Amino acid sequence: MRLEDDEFFFVLDGIAAEFWNLIDGKTSLSKIKKKVSDKHEPPVTKFEKDVAKLVTDLKKEKLVTL
């Protein structure tokens, strides 16, 4: 992959990558959260905090408009 000096390359892995892959513009954020949390059963408080940060970061970089 070739990037110009002022371009960014983002990498997501683990649950964040799975979350990203479920964003399709049709499925609500709450349904995506439920699907991921049902599969992985993460600690609720940490999961909510991590999802909020992920969504905030994605919005900030204009990668999503959830």
Image (cartoon, helix red, strand yellow):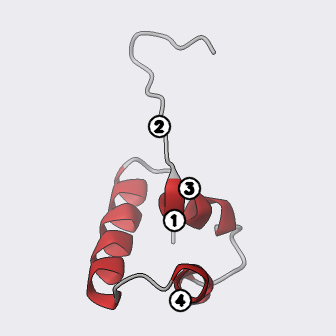
Question: In the image, residue 33 lies at what x, y percent?
Answer: 52, 83
- Name the residue type under label 1: Thr
Dot label at residue 32: none
Q: Amino acid at mark 2?
A: Phe
The Cα atoms of the two marked residues, 4 and 2, are separated by: 24 Å
Q: Nearer the viewer, mark 4 or mark 3?
A: 3
Q: Residues within 10 Å of mark 2 (few under 14, many from 20)?
A: few
Marks 2/1: CA distance? 17 Å
**What is the crowding at mark 1: few (fewer than 14 residues within 10 Å), some, or many (at least 20)?**
few
Q: Position of residue 49 (x, y in %)?
A: 27, 77
Distance, label 4 to label 3, CA atoms, is 17 Å
Q: Earlier in the sequence, mark 4 or mark 2?
A: 2
Whether 36 is drawn above or below 60: the answer is below
State the mark number for residue 30. 4
Disc 4 is placed on an element classified as helix
Left or right: residue 16 compared with residue 53 = right
> What's under tag 3, amino acid-wise?
Ala
Where is residue 16 shown, x and y percent of the image?
49, 60
Q: Name the residue beneath numbered marker 3.
A: 17
Residue 2 lies in quadrant: top right
Task: Please tell me whether mark 4 or mark 1 is closer to you in this view.
Answer: 4
Q: Amino acid at mark 4?
A: Ser
- Tell whether label 1 touches label 4 (CB within 8 Å): no
Q: CA distance from mark 2 to mark 3?
A: 11 Å
Q: Label 3: how many residues lie within 10 Å, few (<14), some (14-19) or many (20+)?
A: few
Q: Which mark is residue 10?
A: 2
Residue hosting label 1: 65
